[in-house]
Amino acid sequence: MQRLDKTISEKLNISRSDAKALIKKGEVTINSKPALSPELKCSEEDEVIVSGKILSAQKFVYIMMNKPKGVVCASEGEKERNVIDLLPKDMRIKNLFPAGRLDKDTTGFVLITNDGEFAHSILSPKKHVEKTYVALLDKPLDSGVIIDFENGMTLGEERLMPASLTVLNDEKTLAKIVIKQGIYHQIKRMFKKHGLEVLELKRIKIGNLPLDEKLSEGKSRYITNEELEKIKEV
């Protein structure tokens, strides 16, 4: 149980004073009854409605974003525009962060959440949650590249986990990559080892959950509980 003004402040990402103002204006109800005091107590089981909108009772939220180029995967502390900046205002609750970073020029599926334990579970190599990408290369790849990916190549002094590499076009310049890690610039460095430059890179799937094809670049939507289970599938 916590104060009503604090709940509204956290859910809508507004100041406590703004939350109190909404309450005093009669914009808030709890379980269909007018709530005129910011000191009222409420729990996650209570239905709180602010200006006609039901506040999410979920402690944690999970958001799918189709990240465009030129946007940083960060939640704060960056001078450049970040993925949280792209979220609609009603989605921007406190403590959101991207679960796993994409490079500034990489596009596609970014999962944004406030659930640190879940984020750790899908990012840990021990969990073997796969991330699937499509890469456009500057030159054709050959069978030697595929073998090196699948055997678990060495980058510097680090031995990588085996990765899947599938050619997608006749020119052998478009490929699908499935990895279980997420080290710094991993896919670009893997191709660079073989003299190949990645011109375009897009993440299209996390676990068994694909990026929603209806989601245009820069747009976001909530992930359903059923979809969340697909991410966890190994």
Image (cartoon, rainbow, N blue to C red):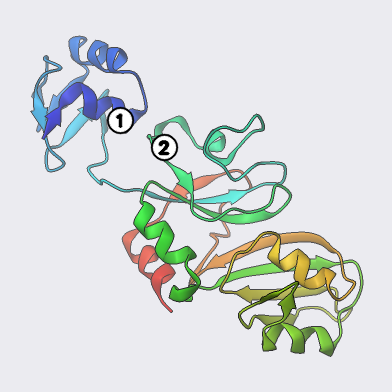
Is residue 215 depicted above or below 29 in this figure? Answer: below
Taking the spot 22% from the left edge, 29% from the top edge, the residue there is 7
What residue is shown at x 22% (from left), y 18% (from top)? 27
Q: Say which quarter of the image contains residue 70.
A: top right
| Residue matched to label 1 | 10
From the top left corner, tell me how far across and down residue 47 is, in percent: 15, 37
Instruction: Tell me the SS state at disc 2.
Output: helix
Quadrant (top left, top right, bottom left, bottom right) of the N terminus: top left
Q: In the shown orientation, is residue 203 left or right of residue 59?
A: right
- 89 relative to 48 in the view: left or right: right
The local secondary structure at tag 1 comes to helix
Which residue is under mark 2? 91
| Residue name at image x 38 percent, y 34 percent | 94
Instruction: Indicate the quadrant where residue 57 lies.
Output: top left
From the image, state whether disc 1 or disc 2 is nearer to you. Answer: 1
Using the rendered view, name the quadrant where residue 144 is placed: bottom right
Q: Position of residue 33 (x, y in %)?
A: 7, 25
Q: Could you say where residue 217 lies in the image, as x and y percent from the top left?
A: 64, 47
